[in-house]
Amino acid sequence: MLMSTRTKENSHFRPSEKTFVFNFKTGQQSCVLTAPIQIPMQGSINDLHGRLMLLHNLPSFIENDLKHSLDQFVDEETKKNYDKEAEAALEKLKTNDMCTEQFVNTWAKAYQETTLEYARPEEPSWDEDFADVYHDLIHSPASETLLNLEHNYFVRVSELISERDMELKKLQERQSVEMDKVMQELGKSLTDEDVNLVAAQHFESQQVLENKWANELKQLMAIQKQEYQEWVIKLHQDMQNPNNSTVSEEIKVKQSQSTVANERVFEERPLLEESFTIHLGAQLKTMHNLRLMRADVLDFCKHKRNQRSGVKLQRLQTALSLYSTSLCGLVLLVDNRINSYSGIKRDFATVCQECTDFHFPRVEQQLEIVQQVVLFASAQRNKKSKERVEEVPNGNGGNEDKSKIGERNPSNILPGEFYTTRHSNLSEVHVVFHLCVDDNVRSSNITARDPAIMGLRNILKVCCTHDITTITIPLLLVHDMSEEMTIPWCLKRSELVFKCIKGFMMEMASWDGGTSRTVQFLVPQSISEEMFYQLSNMLPQIFRVSSTLTLTSRR
């Protein structure tokens, strides 16, 4: 803290040149060394000492004396310079028209903002208080009540979404019939301009209807979030009072309000899964769990129903670990645009909208914040790039750098970069890593230095520093299979990812001290069982799988 403060102060002081004088003897001969030094000194005293010794070819036996004398000279002259500047500042203060009280307040504010000793203690925020309260309740007998209440809200949102889908479907059917009639009259009583006008009107009608339902859904979730948080805080306060008899009644009321409604049930697909236990490390080995799974990536986000009851959400474990040191993460492969308008990003946003998030901002709000951070980072990167280009003499290299600066869209990210979103309303995931990839991941020639692979390394590093102990990774670096992804392609890609992840996991020991983790390798749902079991046989050949020992007693 002191060093950073002095560096900042030095920038306000006018440097002055002082003459350093050092007397020494070599045998019977007396010598004098003089050198001009800027005070306050911006460089390193050790560097200056070394340059003086080398430049003047000084004998080595005076090295320590010269260093001591130089340190003492710089320290004394710096103090004198500070005293002189302070005297000038005080003199200026005496002749200034500003009142003394205003100076005192400004000075006190500067101390509070820059010095920890005088700073005001940070007041806990509402989010922090609510997180502590929720963590206490979810680990208490009230946990089932909380989940039932969340489920009631989920049913209401599902009903609203069903109404929206039904109204949109009716509009599309009505517009389809109208467009068919228009096309039949094309070339008779109607022209192409008339057809385009009708299509534009249809599009505008759809946009108006979608915006209307989006606003209703947004308003409903905001009301639910506020009601939920207020009820949780009130319940926690009542539970702190052991003589309060209304707590059990509140819990019973909320449980009795559990709603059974017609819900949209997702199709349950057969799941293939193989589990392994491995030990990694040179000397101190750490045990990790590996899973190879065949499933859709969004299955880890969608709420799964208990087929016997049909209504209760199977997410107790996710809720218990929401504010813990054992979070669950998922890698989602996306393009370079930060939005939720198309592809897997739109499907993911749709899943997020099917249940209110009572702890974190909506996914759209989180993406807006990410977009602002990316724009700021791009502006800083372009500024530094332009400064480097200006330093380079005019030539082809400078022109190429300028063209690269102009070509890149500042609102997009590059392959290998990623952003994160936080969620409390998904079935098995707390954190989603949105990893940017391009069409190069479909090639068969990627290497361990590919941006997508390096992005996985950085994601694992974030997991180590932010208590994410379970991470799900797309093994083939794709979410869907295509024609070029043959059996040799899948085997080659899987071997590359397995080996790279093994190396990254061995690095984890230096990142987090050897914490046991669970890594889930996910392959697309459309992959064949034969291919799945080939990958399952490959995994223990690359990782060191723990083998079981059978102990028998001698008779």
Image (cartoon, rainbow, N blue to C red):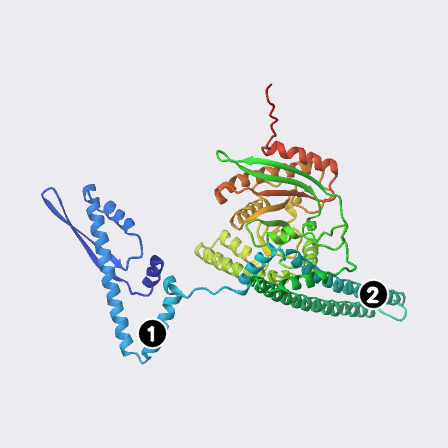
Q: Amino acid at mark 1?
A: Val
What residue is drawn where x is 65% and y is 33%? 538
Relative to the observer, which residue lies in front, 422 or 34?
A: 422
Which numbered circle lies on residue 519?
none
Dot 1 alpha-carbon crowd within 10 angstroms: few under 14, some 14 to 19, many 20 or more: few
What residue is drawn where x is 60% and y is 43%? 518
Relative to the observer, which residue lies in front, 90 or 142?
A: 142
- Circle 1 residue: 104
Q: Amino acid at mark 2?
A: Lys
Q: Is residue 426 toward the left or the right of residue 161 in the image?
A: left
SS category of the residue bearing label 2: helix
Residue 464 appears anywhere in the view: yes
Relative to the observer, which residue lies in front, 147 or 30?
A: 147
Q: x, y (%) of residue 107?
A: 35, 71
- Circle 2 residue: 170
Give the mark nearest the N terminus, 2 or 1: 1
Picture quadrant where residue 408 is located: bottom right
Dot 2 alpha-carbon crowd within 10 angstroms: few under 14, some 14 to 19, many 20 or more: few
Q: State whether residue 136 is above or below residue 288.
A: below
In space, the residues marked 2 and 1 are separated at their CA atoms by 70 Å
Labels 2 and 1 touching (C-beta < 8 A) = no
